[in-house]
Amino acid sequence: MADDTQNNPTFQIQRIYLKDLSLEQPNSPQVLLEQGQPQVEINLALGAQGVGEGMYEVTVTATVTTKVNDKVLFLVEAKQGGIFEIRNIPDDQLQPIIGIACPGIIYPYLRAIVSDICTRAGFPPVVLSEVNFQAMYEAQLAQQQQQGAASGIIMTNGSGAANA
């Protein structure tokens, strides 16, 4: 009986946490007096790495750059992380779990943090739009296949950037 429970597929969240957060206002206070419609650029990056047997850290990083008249108004970079226990999952299902399911769990926390930090900095909240992590995963997989890469989505430095 004990062997049966040890071989059951496991997918559990161990911890969700804010790994890194940065806010910069390099041209304040002068840029705050400028008139004009701000331009907002949002980039996302995914990262994943094994941190122990059956344990994976997955991160989603959002970089929000807001400019007025080509001067940076503010830049926010937030990295939300999660540690997931994933055991006894077939290899062909492991990468999609790490590349789709885990970021989908982490992302709502990241959205709230980005919105909150913008508000606390004195700006209107930036609300990150919903993200289709399956489409991102499939696009990255297609790109890897075009490049003849044999590696999976497990990344240590984060890539898979996408504009939102």
Image: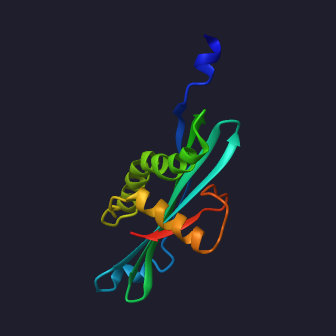
Q: Is residue 3 above or below residue 47?
A: above
Is 87 displayed left or right of 107 in the figure? right
Point out the residue furthest to the top here.
Answer: 1
> Observer-nearest residue: 140 or 52?
140
Name the image quarter holding the N terminus.
top right
Q: Is residue 147 above or below residue 88?
A: below
> Observer-nearest residue: 17 or 130?
130
> Observer-nearest residue: 93 or 103?
93
Q: Position of residue 43 (x, y in %)?
A: 46, 70
Q: Residue 56 lies in what quarter of the image?
A: top right
Q: Residue 151 lies in what quarter of the image?
A: bottom right
Name the image quarter holding the C terminus.
bottom left
Point out the residue furthest to the right here.
Answer: 52
Q: Is residue 142 something that shows in the picture?
A: yes
- Residue at 66 percent across and 62 percent down: it is 157
Q: Where is residue 25 in the image (x, y as percent from the top left)?
A: 48, 73
Q: Is residue 81 something that shows in the picture?
A: no
- Residue at 68 percent across and 46 percent down: it is 50
Q: Is residue 109 above or below residue 4?
A: below
- Residue at 48 percent across and 67 percent down: it is 139
Q: Where is residue 13 in the image (x, y as percent from the top left)?
A: 51, 35
- Residue at 62 percent across and 57 percent down: it is 152
Q: Position of residue 147 (x, y in %)?
A: 62, 74
Is 139 displayed left or right of 34 in the figure? right
Point out the residue furthest to the bottom here.
Answer: 69
Q: How many labels does the image show?
A: 0
* Colouring used for the render: rainbow
